Amino acid sequence: MESERDVDALIIGAGPAGSTAGALLALAGVETLIVESEPFPRFHVGESLLPHTIPLLDRLGVHETVRDLPHTRRKDGASFVTHDGSRHVAYWFADAFPPAIPHAYQVRRDEFDAALLANAVRCGAQLLSGWRATVPQWDGRRITGVRLRDPEGREQFVRCRVTLDASGQASFLASRMGWRFPYPRHRKSAAVAHFKGAWLPPGREAGNITIALAEGGWFWLIPFADDTVSVGAVLDVERWRDLAGSPESVFRAAVEATPEVARRLAAAAAITPFAAVQNFSYRVLQIGGDGFCCLGDAAGFLDPVFSTGVFLATTTAAAAAQDVSEALARHGRVDGADLGPTIALTRSLHRLFFSFIRAYYDPHFLAFFFNPHDAFRIPEAIVSLLAADVLRPGRWRRTTRFRALLALAQAQRWSARLGRPIVAPLAVSPAGRSRG
Ligand SMILES: Cc1cc2nc3c(=O)[nH]c(=O)nc-3n(C[C@H](O)[C@H](O)[C@H](O)COP(=O)(O)OP(=O)(O)OC[C@H]3O[C@@H](n4cnc5c(N)ncnc54)[C@H](O)[C@@H]3O)c2cc1C
């Protein structure tokens, strides 16, 4: 027979979103249960953090723990290089609008996620590890509980005042409710492995994430403390189909077609199996309501090019923890209206980052990106966005300069049509064909 229990807050998933919400709710005195289907530590993509994730790590009390993990490496900026290495630009976080946070970290997600989860448990959250959330229970428009399955297949019903869906790309609620839709013009897949022996740039740039343009996609190279490197190929689905094969053969064919990455990996050997993350771009139409809220990837995901995922996951989780604890203290339940601030923040961060990401796939914008004009302090505006300095007041002033760059790209597009581009266009297009 199915067993039952009651908690105040049920969190589905123990990635960065679930563990952040779990820790902050438990600290606020809310009885919190996290259910995670995968035994930790487990592999996960998403290894490059942004500077403005650090204040939240401080608030959670895990900054030093994360900094001292065996594979964590300090990064001072982000480097971009064309497919053949002929053009290169490095953006340094110290150059952002003041007060800048001058660095961030590369982390191995098995270690990072386990550290955040251990912290949530230390803060008082309960954990069911290896348990899967299976069915949400609705009472009209309100979620009143969730059915779980334990590792032996036994069922338990958990009645709760609020369900926080932090299930990542699985999007537990949105998938079941028909709220999750792919972006028809932005369809990407990725193949990834860790390597030993890759070439790294000298000096301060060695710790940076490098984004290398490729035909129909791009690569990330994320160095860890022991000189192993995470390398991922993000490809338009049409390009992936053209290269046809296993994640490893698609990856190797993409490397072969990208001289700069081939050079950097010439003496390198893969030390992990190749993993694929397929069709990872989707939007979620409803992210909150009576008794529930979707956090992090469960609320939508576009593209990893600017490493915004963990920032979004932890930031939206912290906002939800505040809304939930205040609502429970106020009237003992959580209505959709109580989650208004979290929903508005999630939507506005998606709008901002997604416009930046879409611009990256525009070759006219890229031409400026590789050749940032010093006028109007545009490089600082770009670095501030790359650092995710998007929460402090004054965001409008910073993003206005970014919009100025988008306007310049538009001018470049018109002048290119007349055969006289302002900046020489790049010879490679990462957008691929599904952009339409
Ligand atoms: C190719 C690629 C590269 C990326 N690179 C970066 C990067 O460099 N930097 C960055 O910041 N972000 C990156 N991201 C994004 C980043 O991986 C995610 O945004 C981030 O992990 C989201 O955190 P989360 O807590 O929302 O979800 P997740 O980290 O995915 O955690 C969700 C958890 O929920 C669990 N779960 C799922 N379903 C259930 C269920 N039914 N019951 C119980 N548990 C469940 C899962 O096992 C998982 O542990 C990348 C994404 C992709 C696709």
Image: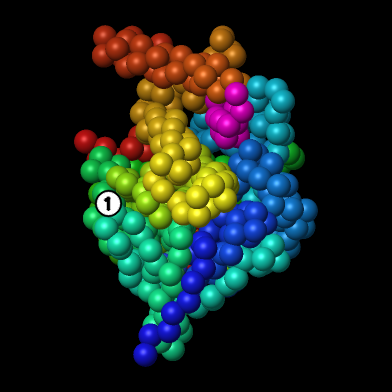
State the image coordinates of residue 167 (x, y, percent, origin top left): 44, 61
Magenta residue span: 381-393
Q: Quadrant of residue 3?
A: bottom left
Q: Residue at x 49, y 25 (%)?
A: 369
Relative to 85, say whether 316 is above or below: below
Q: Is residue 25 left or right of residue 359?
A: right
Q: Is residue 303 left or right of residue 88?
A: left
* Camera-nearest residue between 32 and 261: 32
* Camera-nearest residue between 208 and 244: 208
Badge 1 amino acid: Trp
State the image coordinates of residue 210 (x, y, percent, origin top left): 57, 42
Q: Residue at x 60, y 46 (%)?
A: 49
Relative to 427, say whether 196 is above or below: below
Give the SS element for disc 1.
loop
Q: Residue at x 57, y 50 (%)?
A: 329
Q: Residue at x 38, y 74 (%)?
A: 147
State the image coordinates of residue 230 (x, y, percent, origin top left): 56, 56
State the image coordinates of residue 426 (x, y, percent, origin top left): 40, 27
Q: Which residue is mark 1?
A: 179
Where does the C terminus fall, quadrant-wise?
A: top left
